[in-house]
Amino acid sequence: MITIYHNPRCRKSREGLAILENSNQEFEIVKYLDNHLDQEQLRSILAKLDIKPINLVRTNEAIWKSNYKDKALSDQQLIEIMIEHPKLIERPIVVNSNKAVVGRPAESILNIL
């Protein structure tokens, strides 16, 4: 099953959702700002993306700039910060089996369909 971690208020996330809707494949939508990810889910997503936690952080968000920007943070601390502040997680994330992509640009989603 394909899963999109989606923020309906984000234009890029809506573009990613449109690609999935046009793919004629079944998928589920997880509104991760409403249903926060836990540590296990976030670690699984990071493993499927094959990236370090810092690469999933939206570093231009005000929360990041005012609280974390110049701090030396471990991967574990970054995961905890993203769980506490899900707005800091890049979006959309699309997971298909053991692969995942951040849909920026949205067309990158096509690589895992």
Image (cartoon, rainbow, N blue to C red):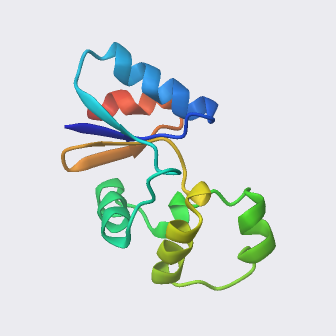
Image side of residue 73 versus residue 2, left or right? right
Percent from the top left, x then y, of residue 46? Answer: 37, 62
Which residue in the rendered view is the most extreme toward the front? 34
Determine whether 103 is above or below 23 in the image: below
* Residue displayed at 55% across by 51% down: 90
Which residue is nearer to you in this view: 52 or 62?
62
The quarter of the rendered structure image containing the N terminus is top left
**Numbered-mark total:** 0
Determine whether 98 is above or below 41 in the image: above
* Residue displayed at 36% across by 14% down: 22
Determine whether 1 is above or below 42 in the image: above
* Residue displayed at 47% across by 40% down: 6
Which residue is nearer to you in this view: 13 or 37?
37
Picture quadrant where residue 113 is located: top left
Percent from the top left, x then y, of residue 2? Answer: 25, 36
Image side of residue 48 versus residue 64, left or right? left
Percent from the top left, x then y, of residue 23? Answer: 30, 17
* Residue displayed at 64% across by 85% down: 72
Percent from the top left, x then y, of residue 29? Answer: 37, 36
Image side of residue 59 versus residue 79, left or right? right
